Amino acid sequence: MVHRSLDPGSSPVILRNPQLTGYSLSRIFALMKRIYLDHTATTPVDPRVLDAMLPYFSETFGNASSVHWYGQQAKVVLEQARETIARSIGAESGEVFFTSGGTESDNFAIKGVAAVAGPKGKRHIVTTRVEHHAVLEPCEHLAREGFEVTYLPVDGHALVSPGLISESLTASVCLVSIMYANNEVGTIYPIQEIASVAHRHGVFVHTDAVQALGRVPLDVRTLGVDLMTISAHKIYGPKGIGALYVKRGTELDPLLQGGGQERGKRPGTENVPLAVGFAKAVELAVAEMDTEPRRLKSLRDDLEARIAAEIPYALVNGHPTSRLPHILNISMDSGRVLLEGEMLLMNMDLKGIAVTSGSACTSGSMQPSHVLLAMGRDPRTAKATLRFAFGKSNTKEDIDYVVESLKSVVRHMTR
Ligand code: PLP
């Protein structure tokens, strides 16, 4: 069954010469052309980031909370990293709290605000149906604890209407959590407008900007948000570190109890090497902001145009203009062709092309994307989806190969 759907053109050496399979499969795979187009799932650590981090594993290794010389050396470096990150988003360094990544920052923001507001009778959170699971799951958790959660619907481009947000803001709402940009389809939300609506009702605003950092300029003061989530590994920094921006005066409880690190808001020995790597990644992203996102957009637009011209039943998901520059999400219209999503991915992988059908966190499951369903795609179309996410390693030459490979895969699967 599986083999019937695999595209024989995907790995000619293996499938046409079965006697070779036992002898050096790993060598054949190692020699294959490979194109990584999954930069929303994660990015490789930039060598300059790695170089910046290395001394802080074994040379300047002190515990940043120790009072002796070793500790103070580490503390200085940690605070420099915090300052770099804070400056890049228009915040003060005292407003940036290091965490283990985007997931923790989202949990910290939502559960932290709820823990303070709940006892005051503000037990209602407003979010959307298209958030990352790192937002949806803490909301579900709070709902099980008796909070009310409103999941706002979105339109066909994944946009939520500020009018709907306004209508949902009753006196019991403590927090609006809406992502800056969607990780699956790239749609960018009008956060500035949303924040001003929410603030008129005295409600805190959190935005998950994990996918936006490094791709669009972010300034927390201009946006007017109270809390903002960012993560290092989406911008060529290390995995396992992120931060939560908390506007001065925003009350939230810590998730963890322990030592008094991060001003008591996030106890645990500070991870100095990762903080340095995060800061270096941010510094590079800021330096490349005028060139790299534009380059990625040009590659993305090129691929989008080629697919539109050459694969007639491909539908583009996401907003046509208000969209992150590096994301292209397409579905094969189930009204015209029935393609199995997993097979599509597997065949692209056999061609050496790494893409996903949606969020990496759910790619192991067979469920259609909750984002695409919320946008009104039918389940079969939603399952036949590919998300291409461009990054530093991609070039114009990749586009031809991706288009030819996709055409060959689709041709075979529809035969
Ligand atoms: N939020 C969004 C929008 C994401 O895309 C991701 C990761 O894919 C996360 C949160 C989780 O971030 P992390 O992997 O740093 O925990």
Image: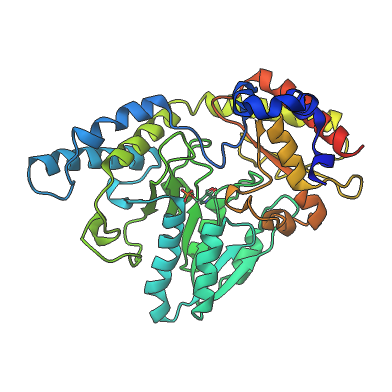
Point 85% across, 29% down: residue: 310
Return the residue nearer the eye: 403 or 187.
403
Return the residue nearer the eye: 150 or 42.
42
183 up-or-down from 301: above or below: below
Q: Position of residue 270 (x, y in %)?
A: 26, 49
Point 72% across, 53% down: residue: 372
Q: Position of residue 12 (x, y in %)?
A: 77, 24
Q: Is residue 196 left or right of residue 269?
A: right
Q: Position of residue 319 (x, y in %)?
A: 70, 44
User: Is residue 34 visible in the rendered structure shown here?
Assistant: no
Point 39% across, 73% down: residue: 115
Q: Is residue 271 left or right of residue 403?
A: left
Which residue is situated farthest in the left direction here?
Answer: 68
Point 73% across, 28% down: residue: 303
Q: Is residue 307 left or right of residue 149?
A: right
135 up-or-down from 293: above or below: below
User: Is residue 406 visible in the rendered structure shown here?
Assistant: yes
Please tell me in which quadrant of the rendered image residue 299 appears. Answer: top right
Instruction: Report how many numbered discs are placed on residues in the image.
Output: 0
Please tell me in which quadrant of the rendered image residue 75 appears. Answer: top left
Which residue is situated farthest in the top direction here?
Answer: 397
Return the residue nearer the eye: 131 or 321.
131
Colouring mode (rainbow / by chain / secondary structure / one colour): rainbow
8 up-or-down from 137: above or below: above
